[in-house]
Amino acid sequence: MTISLATVIADDTKNSDLKWLTDFESAKQASKKTGKPILIEFSGSDWCVPCIRLEKQVFKQEPFIAFARHNLVLLYCDLPYRKKISKELKAQNEALAEQYHVKIYPTVVMVDSAGEIFHREDGYQGDPGEVYVDKLQKALRKHGKKTVD
């Protein structure tokens, strides 16, 4: 029997009305099925202050929640220092961070169902949720994706 990575995050760091996956293959399958691109958040949930701010000021706010629910598959790649995650999940997240050339945290990338990147946000500059969502909408339109408001 094969044991796969947990596909849905189940801790307080992502306590929102959204379904954040943690397994990249599951996210790609969901993207193919729905036609929605994947937003990958690379975070250091227990050590990265800008990551914590992005979470509180954008990802837990209604503008992002409403937008993401209709337009994105969400993937959470956490690389904590103290919090324990499985060896498999840590290996996957480190490999994805290397694949997408993550040098600073948080990094947010949007990719298609094949994993090809088409938008990147390095760091968090303090944008409120509405401004951050506007950037994502523009990136999706530039990539030829219609968005549901």
Image: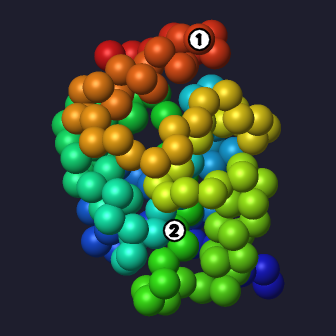
Looking at the image, which is closer to me, 40 or 146? 40
Query: Which disc number belongs to residue 8?
Result: none
Give the structural element (helix, strand or loop) at label 1: helix
Disc nearer the start of the sequence (1/2): 2
- Relative placement, left or right, of 13 versus 98 is left
Residue denoted by label 2: 78
Residue 114 can be seen, yes or no: yes
User: What amino acid is labelled 2 in the image?
Assistant: Asp
Quadrant of the image containing the N terminus = bottom right
Q: Is residue 107 above or below residue 136?
A: below
Q: How crowded is mark 1: few (under 14 residues within 10 Å), some or many (20 or more)?
A: few
Q: In this view, does 42 lie above or below 37?
A: below
Q: Is residue 94 above or below residue 25?
A: below
Where residue 50 appears, as percent x and y from the top left, is 35, 57
- Quarter-of-image position of residue 90: bottom right
Residue denoted by label 1: 142
Where residue 68 appears, as percent x and y from the top left, is 39, 35
Residue at position x 58%, y 41% from top? Answer: 109
